[in-house]
Image (cartoon, grey):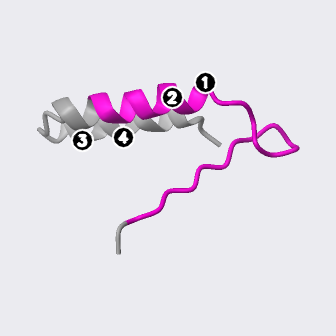
Amino acid sequence: MNTLREAVQSYLALRRGLGFKLLLAGNALQDFDNHIADLPPFESNGRRRVRVRTPT
């Protein structure tokens, strides 16, 4: 399984390769990844679980 950082980089490379600039969104995704990387693991197996609440 890819790390979140690898997935973010791959996603941004793909979208930018298709012509999207993703300046603000790209920075936001990388900032989110950096924030998550600084958190301690939540699971006993050392993995992190991220839950996101979407607006309804």
In the rendered image, the residue lying farthest to the right is 44
Q: What span is colored magenta in the figure? A: 27-54
Q: Secondary structure at mark 2?
A: helix
Mark 1 or mark 3: whose residue is earlier in sequence: 3
Q: Is residue 11 left or right of residue 4?
A: left
Question: Please, what is the three-letter code of the amino acid marked with disc 4?
Answer: Tyr
Q: Position of residue 50 (x, y in %)?
A: 59, 49
Residues under numbered marks 2 and 3 in contact, where contact means CB atoms less than 8 Å apart? no
* Residue found at x 69% / y 42%: 48
Q: Is residue 39 left or right of residue 4?
A: right
Residues under numbered marks 1 and 2 in contact, where contact means CB atoms less than 8 Å apart? yes
State the separation of the CA atoms marked 1 and 3: 26 Å
Q: Which residue is disc 2 drawn over?
A: 35
* Residue found at x 40% / y 65%: 54
Q: Position of residue 41 (x, y in %)?
A: 75, 36
Q: Main secondary structure of the magenta part?
A: loop
> What is the crowding at mark 4: few (fewer than 14 residues within 10 Å), some, or many (at least 20)?
some
Residues under numbered marks 3 and 4 in contact, where contact means CB atoms less than 8 Å apart? yes
State the separation of the CA atoms marked 2 and 3: 22 Å
Question: Please, what is the three-letter code of the amino acid marked with disc 3?
Answer: Arg
Q: Secondary structure at mark 1?
A: loop
Q: Which residue is disc 4 drawn over?
A: 11
Q: Which residue is disc 3 drawn over?
A: 15
State the separation of the CA atoms marked 1 and 2: 5 Å
Mark 4 or mark 2: whose residue is earlier in sequence: 4
Q: Nearer the viewer, mark 1 or mark 4?
A: 1
